[in-house]
Structures are given as C-alpha cells and as structure tokens.
Amino acid sequence: QVHLVESGGGSVQAGGSLRLSCTASGGIFTSYVMGWFRQAPGQEREFVAAISWSSGSIEYGDSVKGRFTISRENAKNLVELQMDNLKSEDTAIYYCAAYHHRGLTRVAGNPRLQNADEYDYWGQGTQVTVSS
C-alpha cells in the first residue's frame, strides 16, 4: 500500500507560479510511474503530467505543455510539479498518483498513462485557485 500526500496548493493571480509536492510512503518509490491529474468542478479528472521512475521519460497534457514541469527525487520519495504562467482555467484540485510500472520505462507517447483509471494509488488532492 502506497500512501501519497500532496502539498503546496493555494491561491495565486493569473501569470503567477506555484510548486506542488507529493511525498510517497509505504512502497518502493522507483517501482512507480508518478503522475499528476487535476479535476475542476463538474469536470472529469484530467491528465496533467507523468514521469518515469528514472525521470528519463516525461509526458504532459496539451493544456499545460510549456508551462508546467514535473520532476522527482527518488532518494526523497518526492515528486513535484512546477506550475508557471498560471491561468484561471488551471483552477482545480490537483492529485498525485502512482502507477506500478512493471518494467515500463517509457512514459512519453503512452496513452495508458494519461488514463486516471490505470493508476494504482492516489493522494487526497490539493486545491489550486488562479484568479484573473
């Protein structure tokens, strides 16, 4: 059982930045692809970014490319999401998720890893609010 805890959410004006963190416990961190998803009220959960266990392969959702950066520090069981040039449409609850990769090394171009249903563990979420 992997336990994920997000932090770093908050309120910011459009054009500003936030950095989300997610700390994992209870499992072997390098066994997992780590992902970020978000969900706005009345909408489905949306893929934001994913990173392979080695950080060698990364994928971003189209709406955040060029603005968000995902990274991980395996020694700290930590995955982060740097969000720059935030827009009002980025307002949502952001969730950290873990996918047991079973040897998968490539994240980029893998549509399964953009599907929330594929992930094994989830954090409780952290609210991000961007005002225009």
Image (spheres, rainbow, N blue to C red):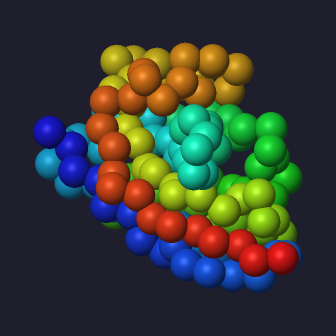
Left/right of residue 74 with respect to residue 67 in the rendered view:
left
Nearest the eye: 60 or 125: 125
Which of the 4 image quarters holds residue 107? top right
**Where in the figure is residue 92, as x and y percent of width and height?**
59, 58
- Residue at the far front: name it: 42
Which of the 4 image quarters holds residue 1? top left
Task: Please determine whether, in this image, residue 71 is positioned above or below residue 122.
Answer: below
Q: Is residue 20 visible?
A: yes
* Residue at (55% x, 17% y) in the render: 112
Q: Is residue 50 visible?
A: no
Nearest the eye: 126 or 112: 126
* Residue at (61% x, 40% y) in the render: 43
**Where in the figure is residue 103, as x and y percent of width and height?**
39, 18
Q: How many marks?
A: 0
Which of the 4 image quarters holds residue 32? top left
* Residue at (46% x, 51% y) in the render: 95
Nearest the eye: 126 or 53: 126
Nearest the eye: 50 or 71: 50
Task: Please determine whether, in this image, residue 82 is positioned above or below residue 32.
Answer: below
**Where in the figure is residue 63, as x and y percent of width and height?**
80, 44
**Where in the figure is residue 6, as x and y percent of width and height?**
39, 63
Left/right of residue 29 with respect to residue 69 in the rendered view:
left
Which quadrant would the C terminus be assigned to in this image?
A: bottom right
